[in-house]
C-alpha cells in the first residue's frame, strides 16, 4: 500500500496538537485499501514524501490506532456474546412458558409468547452466525494491518 504525501501534517488529525492521532482521511484510505486486499497476503505500507518524516512519531500513531481498534473490536465482541446469551435465555424461557401454559391461556396470547421466544432464539443465532463472524474478520484485518511493515521513502 503506497501513501503519497506532500506534508507530514497530512498524516495526523489537525485537532490533535500532539500529532498522536492519524488523520481521518488516512484512516479511510487505509481501510479502503485493506477491504479490497486479500486477508491472507501481507501488505506493507510505504509512506512516500518529498520531506523527511518523523518515522517514530508516525509508527507510534499508527500502532496506537491499531491497538485502539483492537480494543474497540474486543469490546464489541464481548457485548455481542452477552447479547447472544441473553437473547437465547429469553427465547428458551418464553418457549418453556408457552409450553407450560398451553391449556391455561388464550391461544392468541400463547402464540404471541411462542413467537417472541422463537424470535429471540433466532436473533441470538443471527448474531452468532453473522455479526460474530463480521467482528472476527474485522479483527483479523486490524491484526494484519498492525503486523504490516511501515517503510518511508523520500523523493
Image (tube, rainbow, N blue to C red):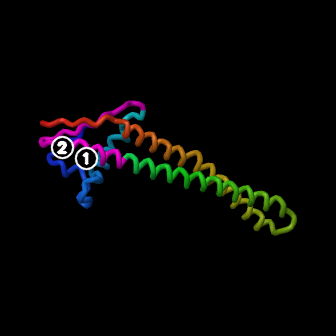
90 displayed left or right of 20: right
Judge whether residue 131 is colored magenta. no
Which mark, residue 28?
none
Which mark, residue 53?
2
- Quadrant where the image shows the N terminus: top left
Foreground: 109 or 54?
Answer: 54
Residue plotted at (15% across, 48% down): 7
- CA separation, marks 1 and 2? 8 Å
Asked if residue 52 is positioned above or below residue 75 in the image, the reply reads: above
Residue plotted at (38% across, 30% down): 41
Residue plotted at (28% across, 37% down): 150
Q: Which residue is mark 1?
A: 57
Residues in magenta, as a range: 40-65
Residue 147 horizontal/vertical position (percent): 37, 36
- Quadrant where the image shows the C terminus: top left
Residue projecting furthest to the right: 103
Asked if residue 51 is positioned above or below residue 95 in the image, the reply reads: above
Amino acid at each position: 500500500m503506497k501513501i503519497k504525501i506532500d506534508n507530514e501534517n497530512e498524516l495526523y488529525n489537525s485537532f490533535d496538537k500532539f500529532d498522536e492521532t492519524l488523520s481521518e482521511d488516512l484512516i479511510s484510505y487505509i481501510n479502503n485499501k485493506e477491504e479490497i486486499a486479500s486477508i491472507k497476503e501481507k501488505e506493507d505500507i510505504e509512506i512516500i514524501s518529498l520531506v523527511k518524516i518523523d518515522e517514530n512519531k508516525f509508527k507510534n500513531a499508527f500502532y496506537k490506532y491499531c491497538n485502539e481498534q483492537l480494543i474497540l473490536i474486543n469490546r464489541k465482541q464481548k457485548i455481542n456474546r452477552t447479547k447472544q446469551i441473553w437473547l437465547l435465555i429469553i427465547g428458551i424461557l418464553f418457549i418453556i412458558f408457552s409450553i407450560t401454559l398451553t391449556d391455561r391461556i388464550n391461544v392468541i396470547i400463547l402464540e404471541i409468547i411462542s413467537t417472541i421466544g422463537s424470535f429471540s432464539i433466532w436473533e441470538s443465532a443471527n448474531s452468532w452466525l453473522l455479526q460474530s463472524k463480521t467482528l472476527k474478520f474485522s479483527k483479523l484485518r486490524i491484526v494484519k494491518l498492525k503486523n504490516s511493515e511501515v517503510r518511508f521513502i523520500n523523493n
